[in-house]
Amino acid sequence: MQKTLKKHGTWIGKWTFVLAATGSAVGLGNIWGFPYKAGTEGGAAFVLIYLLCIVAIGVPIMISEILIGRRSGNSPINAMKKSAIDSGASSLWQLVGWTGIIAGVLILSFYSVIAGICLNYIFIAASPNELITSSEQFGQVISSPTNLLIWHTVFMFLTLLIVSAGVEDGIGRMVKILMPLLGFLLLFMVIYGAINGAFLEALSFLFAPDFSNVGTDTFLSAMGQAFFSMSLGMGSIMAYGAYMPKEQEIVSTSFSVGSLDTLVAILAGLAIFPIIFAFNLEPGSGPGLVFVSLLSAFNQMEFGQLIGPIFFILLSIAALSSSISILEPGVAYLAEEEFLTRKQSAIVISILCWVIGIGTATGFNIFSVVDSSGESINPFLNTMELISVQILQPLGGMLIAIFIGWFMNESLIKNEIPQINPFLYSLWRFFIKYVAPLSVAFIFISQII
Ligand code: TRP
C-alpha cells in the first residue's frame, strides 16, 4: 500500500508549464555561464559539442523527467518511487530524487552568490564609475566578502519568498512578461554588438570549430553545461512536470523549452563576444566575463545608464525564475510528506543553501588561490560545480534515462504520451535507452582514465 501524500497545485492555463520550465532553464547558465565557458573552453568546438549534448542527451531526458513527474503528481523522490513500484522495480530508484536534492542544495548555494552579483550590478550600472575600468570594478565587487554576502542574502530571501508562497500564480504571470522582455533586450544587445563590436570575429569564435584543443575535459564541461542549462538530472523539471495538466503534450513542449534555452545561450554569446573582441578583452577570462564586458559596453553607449540597469534587472529575474525551480523539489518533498509546511520547508532548505554559499562568497577573496597561470580562482565554487554540475547532475540524468529506458513499464509511459507518432517514439526510445546513458558513461569513464 502506498500512502497518500499531500496534494500540490496544478499549473493554470496552457502556457504556464512552458513558461515556468523555460523560466527554469533560462538563467545564469545561459547568459553568464555559457559565454564564459565557450570562452575558456576554446569557442566553437565547445559550442558544437554542447549542441550535440542538448539534442542527444538533453531533450530525451527532459521528456523523461516531465513524464515521470506528471504521472505521479509528486516531488521527484516520490515520483521516482511511485513509477518504480508501479513498474515492479526496486523502490531504491527514489535515491535518484535524493541525489537531486543534494545537487540542488549545492547548486543553489553558489547560484545565489552569482545572482547576488547581478543584483548588485543593477546599481553599479546605474551609476558608472569613471575612474576605474569595468574589470577593476568587477575586481572590487568580488573582493568584498561582506558585499557578496549581503547580496547573496537578498537573493536567497527573494527565492524563499516566492517558493514559500507557492509557484502557481505569481511565477506564471511573472515569466509571461519578463521572459519576452529579456529576449528583446538580448536581441538589442546582439544588434548593438553587430554594429559597434567585432561581430565577425565573434561569429568565427563561436561557430568555426577548431578541434585541436578539444580534450575529454571539453566533453565533460559541455555536457555539464547542457545539463545545467536545461535544469536536468536534479529534479527541477520533474517537479514542474508534476504540476503539468494531463492534456498537455510532453514531447513538443520539451522541444520548445530546449530550443528556447539554446537560442538564449547563443544570443548571449552573440551579444557578448563582439564587445570582448572590440575592446581587446580576454575571451577566456572566466566568470567575470559578462559583468566586465557588458558593463564596459553600457558605460560607453548612449542611455547606457538606463539600459544597463534594466538588463541586470532582467538577468536577476531570469536567475530568480531558475533559482525557485532549484529549491522546489526539496520543498515539495518535505511538504507533501507533511514533515513541515511548505513555508517551513522552504526556510530550512534556504538556510542550508545560504550557509554553504558563504564558501563561494569567501572563495572569491579571502580563500581564493592563484593557479599556475597566474589567474586567481575560487576553489570552493569550482569544487561545488564539479560535484553538483559535472558529476551529480549527469549521474542523475543517466539514472533517469536507464530507469525509463530499461525498468519502467512501457504501458505507463505510453499512457502519458498517447498521441506520439510511432517513429518519434522509437527515436526517443533509442536515444533514452542507448545514446544518453552511454554518452554520459563514456564521458565519465574518459575522465577517470
Ligand atoms: N537552468 C538554469 C540556468 O541555466 C539553472 C537551473 C535551474 C538549474 N534549475 C536547475 C541548474 C536544476 C541545475 C539543475 O541558469
Image (tube, helix red, strand yellow):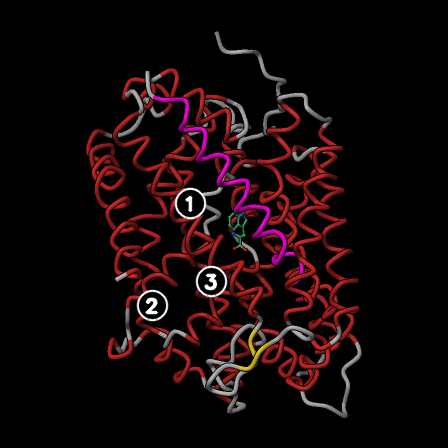
- Asked where in the image residue 330 lies, by quadrant, the reply is top right
Crowd class of label 1 (few under 14; some 14 to 19; many from 20; radius 10 Å): some
405 or 134: nearer the eye?
405
Identify the main secondary structure in magenta.
helix
Residue 358: give x, y in percent of width and height. 70, 60
The residue indicated by pointer 3 is 265
Residue sitting at the far top: 1
Give neighbour class at mark 2: few <14, some 14-19, many 20+ (Cα, 10 Å). many
Residue 8 found in image quarter: top right
At label 2, the amino acid type is Thr
Q: Earlier in the sequence, mark 2 or mark 1?
A: 2
State the residue in front, 442 or 263: 442
> Looking at the rendering, in which quadrant would you find the C terminus?
bottom left
Which numbered mark, 2 or 3, is in the foreground of this view? 2
Residue 339 belongs to the span the image colors magenta: no
Q: In this view, does 257 lie above or below 191?
A: above
Query: In what element is the residue under mark 2?
Result: helix
The circle drawn on residue 256 is 1
* Image marks 2 and 3: residues in contact by CB distance under 8 Å: no
Q: Residue 142: x, y in percent?
A: 69, 74
Q: Give the range drawn in magenta.
A: 90-113
Q: Which dot, 3 or 1, sits closer to the camera?
A: 3
